[in-house]
Amino acid sequence: MPEGDSVFQLSHRLQFMVGREVLASSLRVPSVALADFSGAAVAAVWPYGKHLFMRIGERVLHTHLKMEGTWAIHLKGDRWKKPGHTARVVLELAGSPHPRPIEVVGHSLGLVRVFPDNQYGERMGYLGPDVLAGDWEESGYGTARARLLARRERPVGTALLDQKNLAGVGNEYRAEICFVCGVHPATPVSAVDIDRVLTVTRKLMWENRNSPIRVTTGVRRAGENTYVFGRNQRPCRRCGTRIVKDFLGGVDLGGDAEELERVIWWCPSCQPAPTGYAAAGRG
């Protein structure tokens, strides 16, 4: 599933767009359907957490993959590999030195927005530090730490998914971070070593930033690359105890949008549940 490392790699793949003129554009989302980038040049393409940005002329095209989004690159006239009805963004770029224009197509994107370049900070300022940013050690780490500790009663597994605390962590990394740190996802922030959690978060994501296969165990073979994620009822790689799957979150935790119910995995032996934890019982 797309997380910060996926968007980091996507941004790298799309760097060829920088400097090219947009010959035609089609944004197939009602709220931005009238936006036209024709005649403008792509000035920059960059990631921030799970978000992808393209500065085209004096405007920013902001997209989010959500669960099903993908981007594809074609020469104009070639058949698309995905159905046309799933296209949400189509950018036709000058193809030089190739004689045919290049089509960059965003399929099944979960979010498409356009806003003036000078509004970027105002629009995106709510996000926490990007785990994969170059300045993580200098400023991102401290900011993320302060935001996580501001709500000490909150489950660490919920806090890690809140993009206002730190940007880029999704459900797979959440599961693996908690396992490596030996904490149950429902453990309150106040009861965990938050510095270790942040150090592990950066290390796991940074080491995967350029890898086509997400690996947290150090083993790249299929089926052996994660500790607990997606491994319900399979033996723990450390102690042999059966991995457990359940759910964490929901409106009973306060109703915050970022606390929607999400699946969790953990090892009952390596990650003891906190006192008073009651599983939802749907694992």
Image: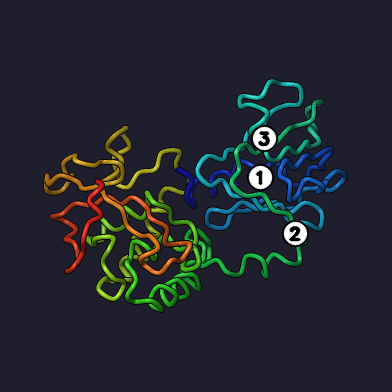
Counting every numbered tag in the picture gives 3
Q: Which mark is residue 115?
A: 2
| Mark 2 neighbour density, 10 Å: few (under 14) some (14–19) many (20 or more) | some
Type of amino acid at the residue the image marks with label 2: Phe
What distance separates the C-alpha of mark 2 from that of mark 3?
A: 20 Å
Judge left or right: residue 170 versus residue 115: left
Which secondary structure, mark 3?
Answer: strand
Residue at the extreme right: 39
What distance separates the C-alpha of mark 1 from that of mark 3?
A: 20 Å
Give yes or no for contact between labels 2 and 3 (Cβ–Cβ under 8 Å). no
Residue corresponding to mark 1: 15
Type of amino acid at the residue the image marks with label 1: Gln
Q: Earlier in the sequence, mark 1 or mark 3?
A: 1
Residue 81 percent location from the top left of the image: 61, 24
Residue 158 percent location from the top left of the image: 37, 63
Q: Earlier in the sequence, mark 1 or mark 2?
A: 1
Towards the viewer: 219 or 87:
87
- Residue found 19% across the figure and 46% down from its top: 243
Q: Earlier in the sequence, mark 2 or mark 3?
A: 3
Towards the viewer: 28 or 157:
28
- Residue found 24% across the figure and 62% down from its top: 183
Towards the viewer: 208 or 109:
109
Q: Which mark is residue 87?
A: 3
Type of amino acid at the residue the image marks with label 3: Ala
Judge left or right: residue 256 versus residue 22: left
- Residue found 40% across the figure and 72% down from its top: 148
| Mark 3 neighbour density, 10 Å: few (under 14) some (14–19) many (20 or more) | many
Residue 147 percent location from the top left of the image: 44, 75
- Residue found 32% across the figure and 75% down from its top: 153
Q: Which mark is residue 165?
A: none
Which secondary structure, mark 2?
Answer: strand
Which quarter of the figure has residue 200? bottom left
